[in-house]
Every structure is written in structure tokens, then in C-alpha cells.
Amino acid sequence: MRSAAAFLVLLLCLYWTKAQGESGGGTENDITQTDVQSEILGVKATSDQTNITPDIWAELKELRDMVIQHSVELRKMEKLEQENTDLEARLNTAENVVEELKRENTVLEARMNTCEKVVEELKRENSDLKSRLNTAENMVEELKRENTVLEARMSSNENEVEELKRENAERPKVAFSVGLTDAGRVGPFNTDITLQFSKIFTNIGQAYSPTTGVFTAPVRGAYYFRFKGFEVESSNWIGIKLYHNDKKITGSDYNDSISYVTVSNDLILQLEKGDVIYMILWSDYIIADESSNHTTFDGFLLFPL
């Protein structure tokens, strides 16, 4: 009977302990002294009815304490298992995150390598551009210097052109070209005469006088003169000469006894202002002209002195 009672009390204690664990209403500290005393009183009452010895109560108390201790340890183990499960889940999540970060890191490293290569290429291109820029700047500076020189030369040339324009505007313009006559022969005369070239082709500056047949130099300078004489009869002699003031410069007489007779000459003379140039027909000589203008006298100012 004692053994049966003890077994029943043990079962009751185990059932009560399990019920407390499943309901979640207790922990290792939830079993109070009042509960223990109630259980002891209940068991004691039963023991009084069944005459159980005090040794059984000690064993029951020991068994109860063991059951409580095991329950506490079980709950700790369950809690640890839950925590372990949570930690494993978190660890798995962390490992997944680490793997993802590794993949991202690999991608970033690849992108970083690409960026570094691009940076190096840009550095080389930048260096080339700097070199080209320096060359261009040097060329610009050289062109600026050349432009400055050219501007100075252009200014000088412009000044010279203006000076030449002024000189040209101030320099007298002198040129004449005249023919002798349309009447045919002139001469012969028993004395030298000044030929009066009466047909005016050009007389710029009016330095030649068709009335006197004399050219008067308006300025000191170098002058060019040319003359030509003509005769239709081969048996006749042409005799003309050019005078500077009262000095004979050149003369021509000619007869070929074959056909028409012509003479010509030209020269450059330095004249002072007021000097005169004219043509003389020698005495006893003949010269002829007509509308074809075979006998002419020309001259113009080359440049003043």
C-alpha cells in the first residue's frame, strides 16, 4: 500500500509539473513555498489515511525536487535550442549577406579596375592634350609676334603709300606727243628753223607750245625725248637736230637713194626748271609729214629731282 501511495503521489507531482510547464504559467522560480506546503499536506493527509512512513515523504520530496530541477533544465534546454535555432537562422542570413557582399565586392572590384584603366587612359589623353595645348599656345604667341611685326610693317607701308600718294599728287604730270603737219613737205630754207609740230596728240601739263615748237621743263628732273623724221623722195636729204637750250644734243641727216627716207633717235636728259627742248630743221634740208603722222616729236617727265 505504501508503495502504491508513493507512486500515486509521484504521478500527481509529475502531472502537476507538466501541466504548469505546458500552460507557461511558471518557471523555476514560480513554484512557491505555498505550493510545496500544499502538496506536502495533501500527501501527508493521504499518508495518514494509508499509514505511509516518513522515509517515503523524504523520497517523494527528493523526487519532486528532481522533477522540478529536470523541468527547469528542460525549459533551459528548449530556450537554448530556440536561441540556437534563431542564431542558426541569423547566421544563415549573415552568410547569405556575406556571399552577396562578396559578389557585390567582386563586381565593384571589376568596375574599379575598369575605372582605374579609364582614369589612366584619361590621364594619358590629358597629358597629350596639355602637350598639344602648350604647342598651340606657343604657336599663338609666335603668330602674335609675327602679327605685331606685320602690323608694324603694314603701318610703315601704309605710311610710305600715303607719302608716295602725296608725292605723286604733288609731282607734276608732264607728257606730250605731237605731229609735224598734214601739208606735206616743209623746207628747204636758206637758214635753220625751229620746227613747229602743230598736231597735238597729247600735251599733259601744257609744257609744249605748238605756237613756238618749244618744250619748257616745268620742274627739275629726268626727261625722256624721242623724234622721228620722214621724206617721200629718196633723192632728198633729211636733216634735223635736237637742241637743249642753245646746245645741240643730237642730229640726223640721211638719204638712201632707194625709197622713202626716215631718221629717228631717243634719249634721256636731265633738265632744270625752265630749260627748253626743241627741234631744228637744217638749212637746205627737207622734211615731210601727212595724215599718217610719219614725223613726230615726243617727251615726258620720268621723275623729278
Image (spheres, helix red, strand yellow):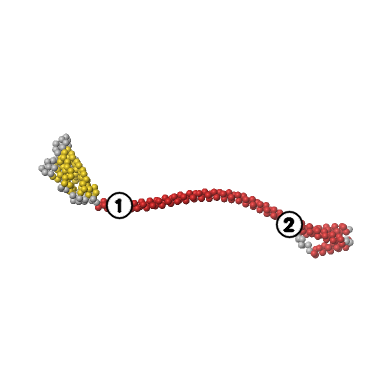
Q: Name the secondary structure under disc 2.
A: helix
* Residue 106 x, y percent position in the rendering: 60, 49
Within 10 angstroms of label 2, few (less than 14), some, or many (20 or more) residues?
few
Is there any visible trace of residue 201 in the rendered image? Answer: no
Q: Residue at x 57, y 50 (%)?
A: 112
Query: Circle 1 sits on which residue?
Result: 160
Crowding at mark 1 (Cα within 10 Å: few <14, some 14-19, many 20+): few
Whole-percent x, y for residue 139 in the image: 42, 50
Q: Where 229 falls versus 18 (above or below)?
A: above
Q: Position of residue 52 (x, y in %)?
A: 88, 61
The residue under label 2 is: 79
* Observer-nearest of 155 and 111: 155
Q: Residue at x 38, y 51 (%)?
A: 146
Amino acid type shown at disc 2? Lys
Query: Which residue is pictured at 83% across the width and 57% down the height?
Result: 11
Q: Amino acid at mark 1?
A: Glu
Quarter of the image for the N terminus: give it: bottom right
